[in-house]
Amino acid sequence: MNISQNEADPVGSTELRSAEAARLAEAFRLFTQVSGELSGAYAQLQVQVAQLTERMRLLQDALPAGVMVLDVAGCIVQANPAAALLLEGDIEGLNWPEVEKARLLESDLPGEFWVVPGRERRLAMTVSALDSAGGRIVLLHDITEAHRLKSQAERHERLAAMGEMAAQLAHQLRTPLAAALLYAGNLENPDLPEPSRIPIAQKTVARLRALERLIRDMLLFARGEALGRETMTVGELVQDAVHIIEPLARQWQVEFLVDDGAGGTELIGNRKELAGALSNLLENALHAVTGNGRVELETRAHADRVDFTIRDNGQGMEPEVVVRLFEPFFTTRAEGTGLGLAIARGVARVHGGGIEVRSRPGQGTEFIFSVARRQAPEPGA
């Protein structure tokens, strides 16, 4: 008769089951212990997150800069008190593009805005991607006082320059004024032959116009501000200058070439002053060339600016002349006022740019007139 192992050894089978039960109990105890530790760690983590969130909230509330968090749809899901103060109202829950359109007005410089109505506060704005889900964070800085101090410093600098050149101005005014008085005195002579009156009158008017041009340039230099603000394309600005320069180029038999590579790029500023500065630079280039002369105007758009490059194949300039080009009343032309380049540089600066000069004797001259370009809006902004 066969007897099974379990029936043969009932004690061993019982011990095996007891050992398995003990291991299961120990495993459950360890699981319970680890679960408790994880629950405790999670609770501590929640406390730390709450503390960090509170600290972050306090930090944001204490920041002088405005901070706004936008969701993927452009809705303002969070804004600190400074943002509400800068934008003059409660903005949480509102659509940011609508808030921006209603309360901000683009200034003359990229990334800077006036708060409307009133335009008493000037803000600098930075927009950055927040996460891969499409959220954004908007930072607003109040630069009203900094902008005021900068404008004040620039005005003081111009006034100081005007004080230094007062003696030169007296000389500049005296010469055409003396000539105009001399010609006008001749017109008073009753014995003056009638055929001579017209040439003398023309010379008198020419000297008075020279005085008018000098005074106009002085006012432009002293003002140093781009009054008026409009949107234009580079191509429109180039055409404004070309209409003035092309007839002069034909008259003086100078080859005039235009390569408008940035024609469709938009700019914001004073169109009349920008066109005037470009025309001044181009006219200077026409004066610089002689036989077989050539003047080129080239435009190129970059990420933050547009460059207007004016080249000529004239005689070029010595280094000591180049360093003085932008000094008020310094000129190499007998009929010039010496203010044109200083005014052009001022126009470039108030439009967020400047002027560079490259010239060598016998190799011509190149002026690069740059202005800040209009920034494209953020997607969804």
Image (cartoon, rainbow, N blue to C red):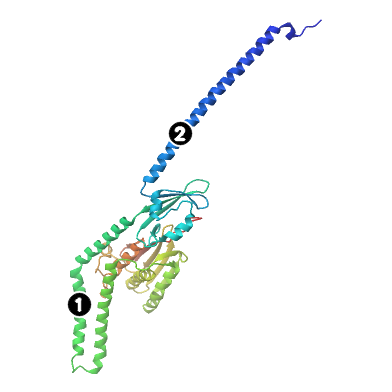
**Residue at the image point whose x is 21% and y is 75% from the top:** 173
What residue is rendered at 45% in x and 33% in y? 47
**Front residue of this view, candidates 93 and 333:** 93
Residue under numbered circle 2: 47
Q: Residue 236, relative to residue 352: is it above or below? A: below
The structure residue drawn at horizontal position 35% and vertical position 54%, both measured from the top left corner, is 142
Relative image position of residue 166 (x, y in whole percent): 19, 69
Q: Amino acid at mark 2?
A: Val
N-term mark: 1 or 2:
2
Q: Are marks 1 and 2 in contact (CB under 8 Å)?
A: no
Q: Which residue is mark 1?
A: 175
Kind of element beneath mark 1: helix
Label 2 residue SS? helix
**Mark 2 burial class by Cα count in 10 Å: few <14, some 14-19, many 20+:** few
| Residue 219 in sight from this viewpoint | yes
* Whether residue 320 is visible: no
Q: Are there few (<14), some (14-19), or many (20+) residues within 10 Å of tag 1?
A: few
**Amino acid found under the numbered disc labelled 1:** Thr
